[in-house]
Image (cartoon, helix red, strand yellow):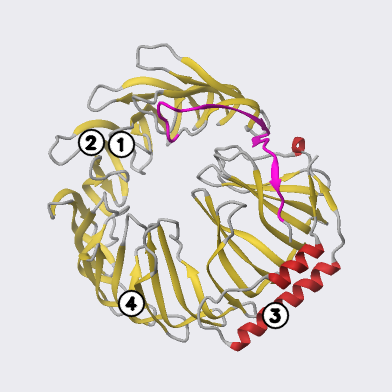
Amino acid sequence: MNKIIKGNQNKYFEWITQNKYKDLALKLKDQEQQKDEALHFDEQNLLQLKEEILEIPHSSWKFLSETKLKKELMNISASNYIEVYENGKGDQVIYFGRYKNKVKDGLWQTLYCLKSGKELIGIGGGLYKNGIKIGKWVEVYKCLIDKLILYQGNYRNGNKIGQWNFKIFENQNKETQIIGGGIYDNNTGFKNGIWIDLHSSYDMDCKTILIGEYKNGIKQGFWKIKQKIGLQQQKFCQIGGGNYNKKGQKIKKWIDLHEDFDSLCIVTYQGEYINGNKIGIWNVIHNKRIRAYGIYELIGQKFGKWIQLYDNYYDLNQIIEIGNYENGKKCKDWTIMMKIPYYERNIKIGGGIYDEIEGKKVGFWVEPHFNFYEDCQIIMIGDYNMGNRIGNWEIYFRMSEKSNYQTIGQGNYNQNGIKFGKWDELQDSYDCNHQIIYSGEYDNGQKNGLWDIKYRTLQEQFQKIGGGNYDNDQKNGRWIEPIYNFNYQNQIFFDGSYQNNQKLGKWNLLCKKSYEDQYQILGGGNYEEKYGTKDGIWIEINDLKNLNQQTKIAKTNFQNGMKLFPIKKFFVL
């Protein structure tokens, strides 16, 4: 029986006296006063709460299936609950505590378990009073690979107050490092003074921060955008920024970051703003060179000739499109070009026509697939009618511009852009090393009947390696499915049954060395019926995404989808 002890007050007050906040930037005297007020308020609220024990047995925990990447609330008993969030990396962040009168109350804990980990670690949490956060809190801000960004500070009646810090958490033996933060006003709960915010793309390979001033929650004056790339770079370098007016609108010259800015997409936009609207010529800079450009009218609409980046642009997928805008809408002929790295030249890979009134695609088009990149050139060819794909569409593949395109898929759309009839379509992760397609029938946009999963190496013929049945887009009955990174060296499959798209019963982990060989059972386990989560003893490969000759098989005990690892450390206020 696991016990969660709510707060050790002596330890908590010791933390208060020993904790020293680090300066984030220039700080004003009134900011120091707000910190003191926040901590004093924190002490008062903790004293008002009685000590209690929550007993939460593993047998009562109901967790998410590994395929459901969302938050879910589970009832443990009459008043105890667990909320679980599993991120895309397979790590689990677990929140649990008590409900009183249908709202959260008392201590709520946050535990973290890496996908590769063997224990649950207390990393955060805090206090609720009648469903409202109070006192000191440590919250999960963002999940990175084997690391977390935590957000730590104080609440008053559900509003953040005083100093809040962003911190990097690696493991319980390493002290957390402050990487940003600032002050919330004690009265309004708005950000005030100098702040270091984290850019949405912040990770360990591309550390990007924004530094500037808030007044009543509104950005003011000059803001800097700084970046530190990789482990070797010791200091942040300014890569962008600009000015805000008193309304928080961008004005004058700015260097903005690309919406998908990261270590593989170091792209900025440079130009001017008037009251938050882009105006005049804007250049797109990639690796210190102008890659695209165009003009904005007074109301912030694009007009005239534009060269702009295509979707999913990054170092290995340097695709641009060239054409004209009228009234902010694309019109007439547009050409899609790809840059050949090292040769500094562009080649045409697609294009088509936009309607001059609605700005929608019409007629014959050649488009790059969303997984198109330098060594995996996939294009789709077919017709549009006012933005809807119609008729037969074909999918072609080549490994480079020196190769010839080959047909690898096709299917039909009706006049409303809905798939019907027989289709051969690509797996989302399709590339030259993972050439997997799915073949089957669509009925009014829904998959039905038998669907085959096929695979090939290089430019061989596709051969069936698995599949199963759909009923109105729901998987049912027995399915054999390849692992995500299936290839010739890693011919590993899952074999089991679905009911209404949910796995249930016995599932085996299979492998074979070639197409002709028989399947060999490596491991597997059971899925329980109610939630479709793993249950009981499972024999698994430690890391399916990094298979090699030393790949190890591990035996793990699950209960309702949760690995039954010990809780090594609880979070203590």
Amino acid marked by disc 1: Asp
Q: Few, some or many C-alpha atoms within 10 Å of disc 3 (few <14, some 14-19, many ≥20)?
A: few
- Residue at 80% x, 60% y is 8
Q: Which residues are magenta?
A: 545-571
Distance of label 2 from label 1 (alpha carbons): 12 Å
Camera-side residue: 226 or 249? 226
Q: Earlier in the sequence, mark 4 or mark 1?
A: 4
Of badges 3 and 4, nearer the viewer stands 3
Looking at the rendering, in which quadrant would you find the N terminus? top right
Against 478, residue 220 (above or below) is below
Against 146, residue 207 (above or below) is below
Q: Which residue is mark 4?
A: 254
Amino acid marked by disc 2: Tyr
Q: Which residue is mark 3?
A: 36
Q: Earlier in the sequence, mark 2 or mark 1?
A: 2
Q: Few, some or many C-alpha atoms within 10 Å of disc 2 (few <14, some 14-19, many ≥20)?
A: some
Are the two marked residues, 3 and 1, in contact with CB atoms closer than 8 angstroms? no
Q: Is residue 550 magenta?
A: yes
- Local SS, label 4: strand
Q: Earlier in the sequence, mark 3 or mark 1?
A: 3
Distance of label 4 from label 1 (alpha carbons): 38 Å
Q: Few, some or many C-alpha atoms within 10 Å of disc 1 (few <14, some 14-19, many ≥20)?
A: many
Against 294, residue 408 (above or below) is above
Distance of label 3 from label 2 (alpha carbons): 65 Å
Of badges 3 and 2, nearer the viewer stands 3
Q: Which residue is mark 2?
A: 396
Are the two marked residues, 2 and 1, in contact with CB atoms closer than 8 angstroms? no
Camera-side residue: 292 or 197? 197
Q: Few, some or many C-alpha atoms within 10 Å of disc 4 (few <14, some 14-19, many ≥20)?
A: many
> Taking 12 as reference, is 308 left or right?
left
